[in-house]
Image (tube, coloured by chain):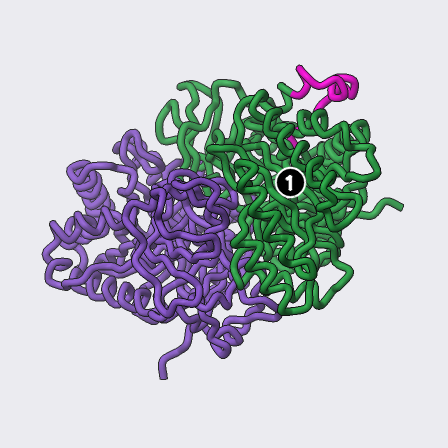
Chain colours: A purple, B green
Amino acid sequence: MRENYFHSDVPLAGKGLPAGDAWTPSRLAAQGPSILEEQVSLPVAVLSESALRHNLAWMREFTEAYGCRLAPHGKTTMSPALFRMQLDAGAWGITLATAPQTVAAHAHGVRRVLLANQLVGKGNFDVIADLQARDPDFWFACVVDSADNVAALGRHFGARGQRIRVLLEVGAAGGRTGVRDEAQARAVLDEIARWPDAVALVGVEVYEGVVKDEAGVRALLRRTLAQWQAIHAAGGFGESPALLSGAGSAWFDVVAEEFAVLARDPRAEVVLRPGCYLTHDVGIYRDAASRIHAANPVAQRMGRGLLPALRLWACVQSRPEPDRAIIGLGKRDAAFDAGFPQPVLHHRPGHTVPADAPAHWQVGAMMDQHAFLQIEAGDDLKVGDLLCFDISHPCLTFDKWRHLLVVDDAHRVVGAVDTHF
Amino acid sequence: MRENYFHSDVPLAGKGLPAGDAWTPSRLAAQGPSILEEQVSLPVAVLSESALRHNLAWMREFTEAYGCRLAPHGKTTMSPALFRMQLDAGAWGITLATAPQTVAAHAHGVRRVLLANQLVGKGNFDVIADLQARDPDFWFACVVDSADNVAALGRHFGARGQRIRVLLEVGAAGGRTGVRDEAQARAVLDEIARWPDAVALVGVEVYEGVVKDEAGVRALLRRTLAQWQAIHAAGGFGESPALLSGAGSAWFDVVAEEFAVLARDPRAEVVLRPGCYLTHDVGIYRDAASRIHAANPVAQRMGRGLLPALRLWACVQSRPEPDRAIIGLGKRDAAFDAGFPQPVLHHRPGHTVPADAPAHWQVGAMMDQHAFLQIEAGDDLKVGDLLCFDISHPCLTFDKWRHLLVVDDAHRVVGAVDTHF
């Protein structure tokens, strides 16, 4: 029997629900309210169940083709139900960005977390040390790029009689975190060696997403691979197999290619960490997917690529001027840092199915609770009409919702997932 | 006895807490963890209790000087504890932006809500009609700017045997919502007249914040006032006194001045709706406050103006290059659409008090979970150091936190407030 990820009994409140109270995902699923029949308060964020399942299967096939492990970046959704879907679809673990995210994932059954960030500050050390004390079988590792941080970790975890797993982070000049050169790497590795009981080096990590061109990405990945090989040759890893991890949501194909040499090597575990593949988008990640499909033979062979699974429905709130509609959808509801939401469907209440939104309908500005839609004088768009929007940048859309409704292809609610930001 | 707003027993989870679980505001207050001693996981959003109380008293004095009512825009904080503080400090009601926000406020004891937006869509009609059915004493009104919307409200609320209060919204050409001219106003008023049992016209409303210059703001306010006077002269209001409402957080002084003619008139109730005064900021609203203090005689007489009460603490996560620090604070934690967070304090763990952050430390970019801080080579800033940031745009900072800690002037936690976005 297929587990149903969208039928939990967690209480839901806030925006994007039908009238009344005491809603839970299971009660929503039982009632099956219709977006098109306006049985839900708008705006609402919806996940297409069919698109989610397609994207899950796509990424599983892709990573298996390369022999890589998948640790999807969970910071994108912070939704335990989606984590479970990803793990059940073969994911090796969940990647996260912060100590509190790790606590939330652990509380919902995640057994292996790769923190693709430095763990910094006594407050965060305490959070992770408490978790490891409560659950010694919980597998956790973070990344390090400074000797100061390694020393602080060593003191803190050593004093508690614990060991913390770390991966050396390699970074690009002008980029974000990560060691820039051999001297910095050496300093970090030397400091790790001073804490044999408290700090275990378990791999090498890189985040290539801050590099903008493919040649630069490949150069960074090769430096990362060489760093792994050098540490391995020196017997520097504290666990075997040792991890080699990279990949945000834009360059995971290139990472798979560059790290392929180690993917089926028993001494290594190559772990990819894309997060946005699950919902995809029609902005930054559609652009990335276009490149992948043009260049990557595995993706080409697989046919249809990732599908946008996260959309927003909102009402036309005002038609104050002939070429302008004000929509009840704002910066509180959708990402706006990588392109505005794009109207894709237009539904008039009472009609049976929505129509495609004309391509010239474009959001030109957003405020906290409103979007300004540019239309043409004479366009048939009325106050009270419904619009469905595709989005760009799932991460900054998810974190605006404490729950998202899951819908079927007829825009009827089949359940919901809650989020833990 | 002074009510304590920050000691509720609501369960807290997620970022910005000490290690362990089962935290509540009251337990936090009892334990009193210190930010400076790193007893809280960073990043964290904090509210200064003393600054909050100063700002509350400031706005009370200001609005009383003009004889205006205050209905603070609650969408800024969506925090019931802060709503209670505002109501106890004399607020007439709470302004909100959406139907679900209204449900949340009602559930936490708010008795009067002015929805400074159109109520649109059957899903949202149902939400409000349910609320009015459950609690007939709950006072609710929304704004209208189209005959279509009035007709839809009339049909829906009439069919349920209910009456909905509406204010005619006046808007500026090129602006957001609101009628642009007399013909649009006439169409809306005529439609209202067709629903005498279901739709009650209780006032006139404007949001002047989309106009950028003072002359334009004053012209819009005068048109709004004239609209109120014309409707009143025609006996068009369904309740007395009739409301005249304006004012976001940037022009509330000008609104108070322009509407002063009706502020002490028994036929009218002048309601101002600023939301950001409670926490203020060092960006868009500091700029607005500078103008107010230069121009407004009441503000000048009151001396010290509004204080920034909402700040963020975060750790230095990486020092990968001499002139760059990566901070564990991202777009998931702070508004970034009206200026980046600005470092104001620098604290080295182990020191007793923080130092002022140098003015040349500036955030130059942000990602989901990171900020890029530009510094100078040789600046004494280490991995693990704490930075306290002022922010610009409270609304889009609040909605990134399910709770905020309340701190005293020594950066010790004295409680917390939860949010309901």
| Residue drawn at the location 35% of the way across and 41% of the way down | A338
Residue sitting at x 41%, y 27%? B364
- Where is residue A153 shown, x and y percent of the image? 47, 44
In the image, residue B391 above or below residue A281: above
Observer able to see residue B148: yes
Residue A375 rendering spot, x and y as whole percentages: 35, 44
Q: Which residues are magenta?
A: B292-309
| Residue situated furthest front in the rendering | B234
Give how far across and how far down residue B292 sits, in percent: 66, 21
Question: To which quarter of the image does residue B354 belong?
Answer: top right
At 53% from the left and 60% from the top, the residue drawn is: A133
Q: Specify few, some or many for label 1: CA neighbours under 10 Å numbering under 14, 14-19, or 20 or more.
A: many
Three-letter residue code for mark 1: Glu
Furthest-right residue in this view: B1
> Camera-side residue: B417 or A72?
B417
- Judging depth in this view, the residue of B261 and A357 nearest the camera is B261
Secondary structure beneath dot 1 equals strand
Asked if residue B385 is among those painted magenta in the image, a careful observer would answer no
Q: Is residue A191 visible?
A: no
Residue B310 relative to residue A415: left or right: right
Choose between A375 and B382: the one closer to the eye.
Answer: A375
Along the horizontal axis of the image, is B102 left or right of A220?
right
Horizontally, residue B347 falls left or right of residue B235, namely left
Instruction: Give the answer, above or below, for where A331 lies relative to A401.
Output: above
Give the number of marks.
Answer: 1
Rendered location of residue A309, percent (x, y): 33, 60
Residue with the mark numbered 1: B205
| Chain at numbered mark 1 | B
